[in-house]
Amino acid sequence: MPEAKITIRDLYLRYSDGKEALKHISLDIQPNAITVVFGPAGGGKSSLLKVLNRLIDLSDVEEMSGEVRMGKLDILERGLDVVGLRRRIGVVFSRPIPLPLTIFQNISFGLEVAGMRDKDELRARVEKALKQAVLWEEIYDRLDDPAASLSGGQQQRLCLARVLALEPEVIMLDEPTSALDPVSTAKIEEFLQEAKKDYTILLAPHNQQQAARMSDYAAFFLQGELVEYAGGSDMFMNPKDKRSQDYVQGRFG
Amino acid sequence: MIEYPQYKKPFYALSKQNSQKVGFSFIRLITLVTILPILGIIAYIVFKGAGSITWEFLTAMPSDGMRAGGILPAIVGTFYLMIGTAIFSIPLGIAAGIYLSEYAADNRWTRLIRIAIVSLAGVPSVVYGLFGLGLFVLFFKFGISILSASLTLSIMTLPVIISTTEESLRSVPYRFRVVGVSLGGTQWQTIRRVILPQALPGIVTGIILGLERAVGETAPILFTGATFFLPHLPGSPMDATMALPYHIYVISTQVPGMPSGIQYGTVLVLLAFVLGMNLIASLIRSRARARRQW
Amino acid sequence: MKRSERFIANSIKIAGSSSILFILLIFFFLVKEGLPALGEVSFKNLFSLRWYPIEELFGILPLISGSLVVTLTSILIALPLGVGTAIYIGEIAPKKIKEILKPTVEIMAGIPSVVLGFIGIQALSPFLRTFLNLPTGLTALSGAILLALIAIPSIVSIAEDALYAVPNSYRDASYALGATQWQTIWGVVMPSARSGLMTAVMLGIGRSLGETMAVMMVTGNAATSFAGLKSIIMPVRTMTATIASEMGEVASSSVHYHVLFFIGIILFIFSLIINISSSSLQGKTKQEKGQVVS
């Protein structure tokens, strides 16, 4: 096994309302692979993703402990440069949320706030990101239109493109296709399969089928606990834990 | 929970439908009584004042003890006061609005700020005048000047700008802030590039409405900046100035034998000034509403 | 980058707290200039019934009663008109008429009080004098009518918000029981909107009490003592008008000057009580953060 991209040790998270979202999770996330984080709603998937790029800072947290490292970087460190972290770990949300800007500005936003000023360089990066997200062909002639004018599927690929533009190391997707039609879903899945050779991908899938289809590794979360962590085919063909067995075979959830 | 209505017996014997008809007619009548005087007043002022509005009236100095000539110094003075008020109140008001909407935690201090804003909004205008006299005119020794009057009007205008700024910012969906931050923007970068532009039309509308009120006020400038008569235009912020509202007060109560044409003309100019700002504000608002993407 | 971010955040935080500073400054300067009055004028004099500063008679009771007479009369006029109009706009009016009425009310709010005072002198007072056969038209009633025009817009907008906040399910439940729209308005909507309507009344009182110019121009400015109902058709002098008309003529730091500031303190405290208590009546609005990361 190659060295893990992100190592999580004994991660514990409790919100101010008393809810224990993550109960002592330990997990190694492998580079250049798709790790699927799945389980019933409220199991801790989203909380985990929020911790990894510290969007958790926007929530009311009562206690967070344990250790999360990406290489030498201590992700849970108080004084961490969270802005830099978020550029390295990008996230795509479950609903497409285009910023109320133009298509171009949606993608250049992250680059500009990172200090990129050169017009040509911005243009090149935007084009590259749109091509990666397989959106360029559809919209190259209306980059200055409002992003809200795109269709839902296009908007979600735009959201993907603006993460890619930052050239992150890790891409996290939280049920990215839950609001999309099958064709758009297929486009995104296709992209992910292609992209895993360059990125570390964390996917909270939209359903079981997607989980099985996409996973190189799979982590099953239930009520804040990591029940089982295994290779993708092992998890879905031959789960070891009784609870993951039941869930995978559709007995609950 | 739904509270079930309990009806009192009608005090006159009418069927339900008829009592509704009578009731509605009554409410309509009340509305007419409320609205008509205002429309009547505006129409009356336009009718009586329009004849006096000439180029000379707008651009000449007053003459013959203000009983002839124009009202240029009052127009210019009001304009200066508006600019002065804008300079001080806009940056401070917007910043405070941003603080309340984006930065402030829900704690005691914030609640104290809110109480202060509500209180500021309710302070009578003449008390602002006293305050301006005490602080700016006498304590800071700015004298009776455009500067003192503008500062006084600014503080009076502040609550309007703060509240509309906060309200406009809050109406921008929270999800944009999360996305902005998730893309590596700092909080301020996200506010400035994404949230603020979306809130801008609402903020501008609030600023205009706040300045509109400031421009029409008399009491706060009575002892801080307004002067009865000035033979020339004010040359610096330290000069006292004439202003339209104060001028109206003067020529309608303090100058005997004032030709009514000049009185109504002056009132019409102020009214046009104020209602013009009102119109601009509502145009901005409706345009922004039509363009909104969320 | 990081340093500028912190600088901006800090400036915004300071600006956010500025309102507290200003309200304290206002209070401080009113007290600084007004409190000496208590040492210079005997208690008996200050709370006597004679306001005659030239003879060192500083009885503020007639001024307080003048303010109260004018304010209460104005609210008696403004309340039914304002709430009725709000009911019409909020519950009855067809959409098109609503879209005309709302901006009209806003325009009403924008008319400077000095303009209303002018119309009061020109049209209202002469009319009231002949209509009621009075020795002078410059009475508390004239002032109250103008004040009603000033208070109505805020009453309408707050009352309308209060009606709007009543959930539609209440109305539906009432209709389901066979009530007419009219019965629903009286039996269900109005009672549910009670606290909002109270706020409207309180803020209306606050506006009226603090209003200066219109009152000063039409109430005759005679510091008469309270004479029961008859006070309404007699000339009166309010606290605000006293400050506005006399501050310009007094030497600073004279006894008269201090007493005028002392009246300012009274006004300030009145406005604080009214505004803070009415804002605590009103519910707080909190931003829905919403779930982005599901």
Image: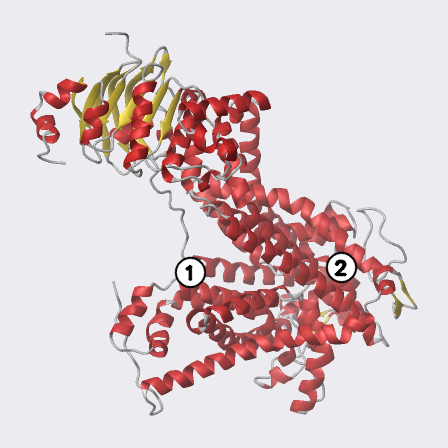
| Alpha carbons under labels 1 and 2: distance apart | 41 Å
Q: Quadrant of the N terminus of chain A?
A: top left
- Residue B45 visible within the image: yes
Q: Which chain is mark 1 on?
A: C
Of the numbered discs in the image, which one, if any, rests on residue C254? 2
Q: Quadrant of residue C21?
A: top right
Q: Is residue A228 left or right of residue B76?
A: left
- Residue C50 visible within the image: no
Of A105 and B204, nearer the camera is A105
Q: Quadrant of residue C166?
A: bottom left
The kind of residue tagged 1 is Leu
Q: Which chain is mark 2 on?
A: C
- Around disc 1, counting alpha carbons within 10 Å, would you say few (fewer than 14), some (14 to 19), or many (20 or more)? some
Where disc 2 sits, the SS reads loop
Of A93 and C192, nearer the camera is A93
Q: Viewer-nearest of labels 1 and 2?
A: 1
Residue C251: image location, x then y, percent: 79, 59
Residue at the farthest right position: B64
**Residue B158 against residue C224 in the figure, above or below:** above
Of the numbered discs in the image, which one, if any, rests on residue C281? 1
- Around disc 2, counting alpha carbons within 10 Å, would you say few (fewer than 14), some (14 to 19), or many (20 or more)? few
Q: Is residue B170 left or right of residue B279?
A: left
